[in-house]
Amino acid sequence: MKDTKLGTRVIANDGRPPWYSHDGQNCDTYIVGIAGASASGKTSVAQRIIKNLNVPWVVLLSMDSFYKDLTPEQVKIADNNDWDFDSPDSYDYDILIETITKLKQGKMVDVPIYDFETHTRRKDKHHTVYGANVIIFEGIFGLYDKKVLDLLNLKIFVDTDADICLARRLKRDVAERGFDVQGVLQLYQRFVKPAYDNYVYPTRANADVIIPRGLENLVAIDLLTKHIQRQLQDRKMKSRWDLARIEPPLAPSPNVIVLKETKQILGMHTMMRDANTSRHDFIFYADRMATLVIERALDEIPYEPQVVETPTAKTFNGLKVAAQIVGVSILRAGGTLEVGLRRVLGDIAIGKILIQTDPSSGEPQLHYCKLPQSIHAPDCYVFLCDAVVGTGAAALMAIRVLLDYEVPEDRIVFLCFLAGPQGLHVVSQAFPKVKIVTSFIDPVLNADTLYLEPGMGQFADRYYDS
Amino acid sequence: MSYTSSQVIVLPQTKQLQAMLTIIRDKNTQRADFIFYSDRIIRILVEEGLNHLPVVEKIVTTPTGKEFKGIDFQGRICGVSIMRAGESMEQGLRDVCRSVRIGKILIQRDEETALPKLYYAKFPPDIASRYCLLLDPMLATGGSAIKAIETLIEYGVPEERILFLNLIACPEGIKAVVDKFPTMKIVTAGIDQGLDDKLYINPGLGDFGCRYFGTDK
């Protein structure tokens, strides 16, 4: 029986700061690989590094998740403790490499869950991992495969004395898992020790750093932590205040669509902008405006010819929407377009992305992301909603999330009530295929308050009365 | 045709509007969808209709302390639905204009003369001072629309303050109405080819009131 350890898990609850540069391109995720003997303390070292780093959104990825599925015959052998799980061949390197490659590119991945009862990967379940700034990958063969090695930024080998490893393994398997001493020693002699000597120990040569004595070696772990921190420091993106000082071009990009300024639009804006407008009225006009923005956005999706017969038996050559649409609101303010989404698109699925501004740095941070399955459909368009585009920082982050979930850029339509030239420029520069529909463009982004002027004030506060 | 484009306003024929019209024309469309898409088109019709009301400039102060140069609508409105089908447009009107006053007119074909006859009219008492949004989803021969407009004028509403909101019109009906009333306005989502020999709009969508209210089955 093997240790299930942690599988993968996201540690820390803080929001995730930007993981991409100001042009919207992902920076590679920093990946640390840790190898070493069974019970050498790989996981403890990983956890110590995570604790020291104290950065949010670190993912611990265990190689155990990538065991190969066993056939029914092989399962019988395994149940008799005769199967060699300590061979480098027992891992599915294709899925492992695909997973680490995607994580490195910042994309969302489904990490398999290995069921040690059935010795197969769960068909019905997986861990969805998204949004790591640092990934720590650990396993006895963590530094074994050449292709895996190429993906690692830092390679660590935990070199703990073999006697200590055996003692720990004995203690763990006997005390915590109810094995008998005889069985553990038998497995150790037959599989664990030979595999270590033949395959694991030689991978020391692939390591950048060898940590003798494992977790006891605090000096080594702290030095490593400092090194990782320096690497992460170099990846900071421009702040929102830098974005606010960008000089935008006079004319917005052709992918920016502004509602025609009719009397209705102007009249509704007059109501919404007036500081004296009651909350009741503000909501009413916001919902009405949202409906019009969404109706306009619907002209940006594909249609196909559709012939129908009327009740009077006449033929009509019409059109039909040839796409699925999913709404995604950038919380909190983007939720103000949801009433409109429901009015126009009825039972549309709506995903949520919570992005908050970190009060200490002014940077946007990703806190939460839940997207409907249908965003993966080949004909799916995403209506990404936020109330106001000021600096464009939140829009940039939300679009980046959708791209990381592999929504094609030209399938994203960004909807908002109000936008400023800087934000529109930032978004359309970074993501030129994303269309942006807004009901109005305001001329000024105040570089100190980051509010648009004349603007509408704090949109979500006015809508939600907070 | 004798009408001018300023008198007859056709909604921009966007792809999504055409797709919505396709759904409500389809005889196989379920009633829930028929209502949902009709309401969506009607809201757009009302939004467009309101664009033709007079406005004055209005400057407001935003929460950032800056001025916004906007507009304010002049004059009050009321809705008048031609029963029964016109009542289907009241929800869309209320979605856009909360607590709007609504009057009703019942016009039926007189069995003896075959002409439209006014059976019932109930209006807000101050209707003469309001802009009237007259609601009827289909404009076929124009018989009931003309009767309704005549009634409004009798109640003191100036002709130029009447806006007729309509989903599907045809050239015959438009001509009949604008020939008689050259200063009112018609806002419609689409103009069909014409009338068939049974005086149904071709291709049309059948009986709107029956499909909306579920009395067709």
Image (cartoon, coloured by chain):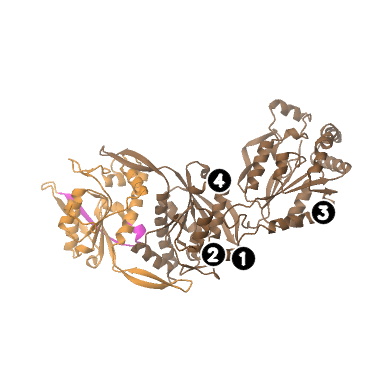
Residue on which disc 3 sits:
A220
Q: Chain of mark 1?
A: A
Q: Secondary structure at mark 4?
A: loop
Cβ–Cβ under 8 Å for marks 2 and 3: no
Q: Nearer the viewer, residue B85 or A460?
A: A460
**In this figure, which residue is indicated by the disc labeled 1?**
A359
Residue A352 picture location, percent across and down: 54, 53
Image disc number at residue A406: 4
Please give the letter of the chain rendered in orange. B
Whole-Å distance between the Cαs marked 2 and 3?
43 Å
User: Marks 2 and 4, Cα distance to the nearest angstrom?
Assistant: 29 Å
Chain shown in brown: A
- Residue A192 higher or lower than A232, as above or below: above
Q: Are marks 1 and 3 on the same chain?
A: yes
The mark closer to the camera, 4 or 1, is: 4
Which of marks 1 and 4 precedes in the sequence? 1
Q: Which residue is mark 2?
A: A246
Percent across and percent down for residue B91 are 34, 55
User: Real-space Cα distance between discs 4 and 1?
Assistant: 30 Å
Q: Is residue A237 left or right of residue A275?
A: right
Precedes in sequence: disc 3 or disc 4? 3
Q: SS at mark 1?
A: loop
Residue B189 seen in this snapshot: yes
Q: Are marks 4 and 1 on the same chain?
A: yes
- Check the picture and name the quadrant holding the N terminus of chain A: top right
Q: Mark 1 belongs to which amino acid?
A: Pro
> Which is nearer the eye, A379 or A337?
A379
The outermost residue toward the left is: B113
As drawn, which residue projects farthest toward the right?
A163
Task: Name the N-terminal-most of marks 1 and 3.
Answer: 3
